[in-house]
Every structure is written in structure tokens, then in C-alpha cells.
Image: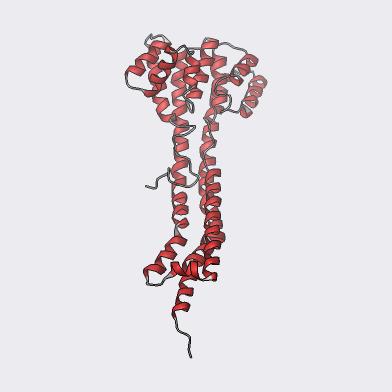
Amino acid sequence: MVSLVSMPGLRPATAADAGAEEAAVSVRTLAVLLQAGAVPLNAWRHLADSGDVHAESVVARCDEGAGLVDAIEAEGGAWADVAAAWDVATTVGAPLAEVLRSLAETMRDAAAAADDVRIALAEPAGTARLLLWMPLAGLLLGFALGFDTVSVLFSNPLGTACLIVGLLLVLGARLWTRRLLRRAQPDPGTPGMHAELMSVALSGGASIERSLRLVDDSPARDRISGTHTRGVLELSRAAGVPAGELLRAAAAQERHDARIRGRLRASKLSSQLIIPLGVCTLPAFLLLGVAPLMLSVMSSTPLPI
């Protein structure tokens, strides 16, 4: 399998959104502990005692005087969503165990969608990585055939020009490929989280206006967008139906749409990578692999008298 970590411009699944799957397991365990009657901080202590490193960090911060929500948020990444759900649920009085159970399923679904996109990106990213080595491979091939291609690049003015232009083209291909790979990455954050948090706030009896304020001020505010949420709320008002189920359905649809968009970006990437291949990589191969070989042959062939 191609290593995602080694791809130029390809984010590993451990950075800002990292550990969404791992966080989902911890959150589900917390939900079970809370449902069994444990108070929130004790639930975190039990989770820490089981060896959960994130729970250990949260408990350590709480022992130092930090608030529980702040301690959770400090873990970063997907834990900001957990902190936001915890904050909203405790503020409005929503059943915390039920909220965390639903959040765990949401995070698991979002992590699966992001993994699908990264797997789809692995093949074109691996191809791009291999093609970036093609100019160097051409240079080494000439050397392996017995031609002094390396010295030609430094002693012959034409060879030196080929070396400089070829290296510039390799650098351009790398930067271009990295940009294409970065643009194809899954969007940060958990799709549909704004709608999920709104449904949590409304389930606790908060008004729509107060729910919006709570969500917009939550620890996950930098990772969520309420673009679709307001349309759902308008539909709820117009149809006269509770917004909770509509919001959860909209959140699920956002996650589905994010998965489809990611797969489409991955499928387009294969054709997009042809452009830097034709514009930069192949000319660099000719300049660093073929041209030095030809110059070496010409320099070693005696001129007729």
C-alpha cells in the first residue's frame, strides 16, 4: 500500500482532524459510563484509568484547575467537536449520555468518509511521487550504461544549462503536484457538525435564537459552518415541524455530500496530474536523462579527420 504520509502535499490522517475514529471510541465509552450513573469528571477518570491517553491529558488539566470543556478543547482536532457538544448539552440541560452516543456515531461516519477519500487519493498520489523521480532515474541510467553523464553536466556549458533548467522543472513539478494534492484533500472539520450541535441545543429546550448563539460561541466555531442549518430552520418554520429531526437529517446529508465531493476530487486528480507531467516532468527527464547521454556520446566520439 502506498504510504500517505510520504506523499508530497498529502496530509496524513493524524493532523488537525486526526483521531476522529479514536475519539469516537472514547466518546462512546464516556456515554456508557455516564448512562451508568458516573458523574462527568469521574467518567473521564475511569476512561483515563483504562489507558486512554486523551482522557489522561484531560484529567491532568482538570487537576491543574482547568474547566472540563476547556480541558477537552485543548486536545485539538476532533476533540473540539466533543468539547462543543459537551458545552452545548450541559448549558441547555440536554441528556449528555444520549448526546455523546449520537456524537460518536457522527464522528465515526465522518472519519469513514475522510478515510474513503484518502484511500482514493493514494493511487494518484503514489503515481505522482514515482514520476517525480523519473528525471533522476534517467540520469542514473546513462551513468549505469557507462557514459560519463555526470561530468558532462558540469564540464559542458550545454550540459550545465540542461542541469539548471532540468532541476528548475523538477522543482516546479513538485510544487505543482503538491498544490494539486493539497486541493484534493478532505475539508477540515466534521461535516454537518453545526446542524448536529443545533439539534442538541434544541433538544434541551433552548430557543432557536439562543441555540444559534450557543453553537456560534462553542469551541468548534472555527471548524463548523451554518450555511445549510439556516435553510433547515426556515423549512422547519414554514412547515411547522420540529427542527431536531430535520437538522439531524441535514447533517447526515452533509456528510454524504462531503464523501461524494471528496471522491470526485480524487477521480479528477488522476487527469490533473497529467499536466505537470507533460509540462515539467517529461522535459526534465529529457534534459537530465537524455540530453547528457547524447552529449556524452558526442564528446566521446572522435571527429573524422
Q: Is residue 101 above or below residue 301?
A: above
Image spot of residue 152 (x, y percent): 47, 70
Left or right: residue 49 compared with residue 58: left
Residue shown at the point (45%, 19%) measured from the top left: 100
Q: Residue at x 61, y 21 (%)?
A: 216
Q: Is residue 77 above or below residue 240?
A: below
Measuring from the top left, give residue 213's x and y in whole percent: 63, 17
Q: Position of residue 25 (x, y in %)?
A: 39, 25
Q: Nearer the viewer, residue 69 or 147?
A: 147
**Any part of residue 271 in sight:** no
Estimate the x, y position of residue 268 in percent, counting from the top left: 54, 50
Q: Is residue 82 left or right of residue 49?
A: right
Which residue occupies the extreme left position in the image? Answer: 50
Residue drawn 58% across and 24% down? 221
Residue furthest to the front in view is 155
Q: Nearer the viewer, residue 304 or 17?
A: 304
Residue 14, picture quadrant:
top left
Front residue of this view, candidates 35 and 73: 73
